[in-house]
Image: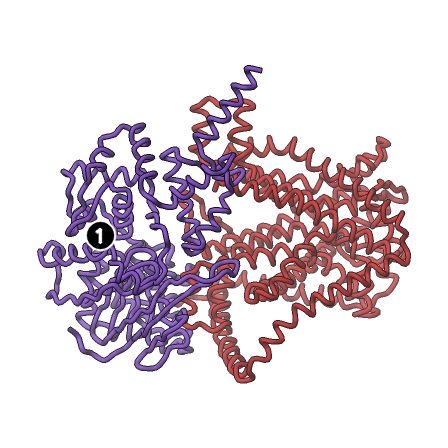
Chain colours: A red, B purple
Amino acid sequence: MARQFAWPDLVVSFALVGLLATMAWLGHDMWVPLRPEITASLDLNPTRLPYYAARSLLRMFIALVASLGFTLVVASWAAKSARAARVILPSLDILQSVPVLGFLSATVTFFMALAPGRMLGLELASIFAIFTGQVWNLTFAFHRTLVTLPGEQVEAVRLYQLSAWQRFTHLELPAGVIPLVWNGMMSFGGGWFFLAASEAITVLNQEFVIPGIGSYMAFAVRAKDVPALAWALLTMAGVILLVDRGFWRPLVAWSEKFKFEDVPGTEPQRSLALEFLRRSRLTTGFGRLLARADERVDRLWRHLAAGRAAAGTRTARGGGLLPILLWAVLGLFAVRGAAFVATAVSWDEALRILGLGALTLTRVGAVLAFSAAVWTPVGVWVGLNPRVAQIAQPVAQLLASFPANFLFPFVTILFLHLHWSLEWGGALLMTLGAQWYVLFNTIAGAMGIPSDLREMGRNFRLQGVAWWRTLILPAIFPAWVTGALTAAGGAWNASIVAEVVNWGNQRLAATGLGAYITEATTKGDWPRIVLGVAVMSAYVVTLNQLIWRPLGRLAERRCPLG
Amino acid sequence: MNHGAMLLEARRVTKRFPLPEGDGEYTVLHEVDLVVREDEIVALLGKSGSGKSTLLRILSGLMLPSTGEVRYRGNPLAGPCAGTAMVFQTFALLPWLDVLGNVELGLKAWGIPPDVRRPKALRMIDVIGLDGHESAYPRELSGGMRQRVGFARALVLEPDVLLMDEPFSALDVLTAENLRGELLDLWLGRHFPTRAILIVTHNIEEAVLLADRVIVLGANPGHVRAEVPINLPRPRRHERPEVQALVDRFYQLLTRPETPDEARRVMPVRPALPQLPLIRVGTLGGLVEILADRGGRVDLHRLADDLQFDVDDLLPLLEAATLLGLARVEEADAILTQEGVRFAQASILERKEHFQQLLVAHPTIITRIHAALAAKANHRLPKAFFEDVLEEHFSGKEAERQLDTAIQWARFAELFSYDADTEELFLEREVVKEAEDSARQTASH
């Protein structure tokens, strides 16, 4: 096994050093004092774009790491303690439905107070926005893994008396790798949207800007600089492709080793970058280092656990009290919030807001209707043609992770040119991002139809309406429901940025809850921000309960393919 | 009989599980006494529902008994027992660790440093016949090789008692036989320091070939029905007459209904209705036809052998045939009755009718459900209603299985059926007839 230090090692070490240096440099720039001249202008020279993109990328990764940390802790807690789960799971479910962008104003103020006079406060606010856009998904996925671990493996781990830490590193974390990687990849794609929306925002009539590709876009819009916009678009596409090839593909290929069983007939995922890394000796050394660290932590853990066991049962009782305390705090917040809103908003206005919600709901419905009508047939066609699907599926996934708000300015120009109103145009903007979820879930559903069933359809000469109604639609229904649910969630969130758009100093606005929240944010009108976000959350939660949950159950019960 | 030192001992072990929704509990094991001594292989033999896997988990310390206690070398057990190690039915390997990593797992958990545990693990990998596969991942191995990893992982801990939970049942017949033989050779040749083996099985032949002592468990709740020492010389070969005779004897033991006295000793209040064996009507038809083909009387052991059936497959079928009067068991032979001969010769439609007559003639939960539906004006009742009633007689999951089996049998007989949309049971003929009546009425108006 003794091998000379070879060129893969060299390349990997160069890459490593380069990466660390870049991170240190960018990290330093996050820490600079907040001076108006920095935040008020941004250099629209395209040569600055790589730097801005790197700043944005760093934010995305910090948010990803934070999401992962949150997930590991909170999902484990919910899986270990039934009482904690009773608080955590419903809370996450609601948080998942809260339109994150509505709260940007609150978080900006909060994080600015944490790091007064520094850029860091704004950076943290942006990172937090991305974090809240991706974390719930990950937490649910990991929690699901933890509560569905195979019984005999769990027994083996108990019987062989692995410590809590060993159980985590040998069973729970490895079992969660695949869902974490896949959900991470999806959420990361969704994160760009929040990044673009959070790098340049107006709160209390004051504009806050942090250097990044999203703020570059915002400044290009204000300057009506179309070439700059095009450059930003191109850079964004490049960055997404780069992250996909350089980070997610290798991760997906690596995660294959955590499969419980090989599914026969599936091609293993491949990644050039991963093969390169695997050939480097540094990677093996790093693996060994990790293993040693794991044993070290385990020893420390046992030591601490022994100490805790000696301290008695106090912790156990504290664990019982905590959920009650949490509920009490949540209840207090709700009452306080309601009282706060009531000081400024009359009943009539509250009713009007419900009406605005209905308007936005109509747009969300239009998004779904359009996506269903267009992308379901296309998705089925793609899914049933394996050779097309091979190319089209990754493309659809990339398109879904392309932040739609980068396309908004171009569509806005079109609307202005054609004198279209945003009342319906808003729905079109919301569709730009949301439709892809319907497409690639439909593709996945169609690919999952067993070939036996397809051959049966041909053999019995099922055609036209009968073919769709008896075979295709029921077969793709479960996947389609998942796609439509995600698309609806995306559309609600997008409404906050899609119902008011600018081009230079021209402004288009639609009547709706999203526009209401955006306007309240701009004015810094706290009671109305709270009310707007609460109403939108209520809409989303209610629709989940009334429509998506029952549809999901129906799909599970009546269309159990695969 | 063996008189080695006592290693593992269960004293009046009873295990109850709470029923879902908090109403009461059901008993899985009832006052089980069991001893494992040095230098012996003990087999726990029982059909499904006898709580044999639960008993094994209690002996390993994975579960605590509700009452009674388990002692290891005289000391009561309160958690996973360091003197035992378990081999699992579906191997329970961690797919992300290679063979070496999996074998090292238990040693690692004990905090043994790498330079000590690695040679130990490698030696055991050699012993168990896995050398060369150290860096393979479980996914790349066949079932037999995976179970070898399972054995190595348990044996490297040098347990006093090796516990095995149906370790060969997930393997094909030839692989199982091969691995069983190798394990026995290693044990007889003292290639690992384990002092006793306890194996749970539902394969009678496996028990007779391996064990020095077989403990037969009865079901509902699990209890010890018999304890049979096996003093046959080794190597035992299954075609030998003395082995065959013993296998036959275990078939008799397992198929003989318990006398009322025996039953009362285990559980004072028995369920008022006989339990439905959880089998499909089609399989029952197959058994009856095979019996008819072979002249109406077949040795159970031969039958199981020919069909590659375990006790778990064959006994419920025989119970069903006996329950409906299609066959009876005598001296470990299955004998077709007059009804059985008629059933075997019937056409599909005749068979449905015949089956319906049989179900009506023999009181089971099916007759009860039928009566309840007949008494209702619209001949419909929700499934949940019957689940509630059955849960008074059976454990939660068993009640569900009983109801599913009842529906399946009744559907074949066209007695009653189940509507998955409304989640109701209904009398098929009555409902159809009424629909026709009302259609006729509307037509005449």
Snapshot quadrant of residue B414: top left
The residue lying furthest to the top in this view is: B444
Which residue is at 75% across, 65% downward? A30
The answer to whether any part of residue A53 appears in the image is yes
Which residue is at 50% across, 22% downward? B437
**Camera-side residue of A391 and B434:** B434
Residue A488: x and y, percent?
69, 43
Rate crowding at label 1 as few (under 14), some (14 to 19) or many (20 or more) other CA atoms within 10 Å. few
Left or right of B90? Residue A527 is right
Residue A254: x and y, percent?
49, 56
Residue A182: x and y, percent?
56, 52
Left or right of B442? Residue A44 is right
Q: Amino acid at mark 1?
A: Leu
Identify the residue under disc 1: B174
- Label 1 resides on the chain identified as B
Which residue is at 88% across, 44% downward? A504
Quadrant holding the C terminus of chain B: top right
The residue lying furthest to the left in this view is: B241
Residue A476: x and y, percent?
55, 36
Quadrant holding the N terminus of chain B: bottom left
Left or right of A130? Residue A265 is left
Seen in the picture, residue A255 relative to A225 is either above or below; the reply is: below
Seen in the picture, residue B56 relative to A407 is either above or below; the reply is: below
The answer to whether any part of residue B205 appears in the image is no
**Camera-side residue of A150 and A275:** A150
Q: Tag 1, which secondary structure? A: helix
**Camera-side residue of B4 and B102:** B4
**Camera-side residue of A363 and B354:** B354
Seen in the picture, residue B160 relative to B265 is either above or below; the reply is: below
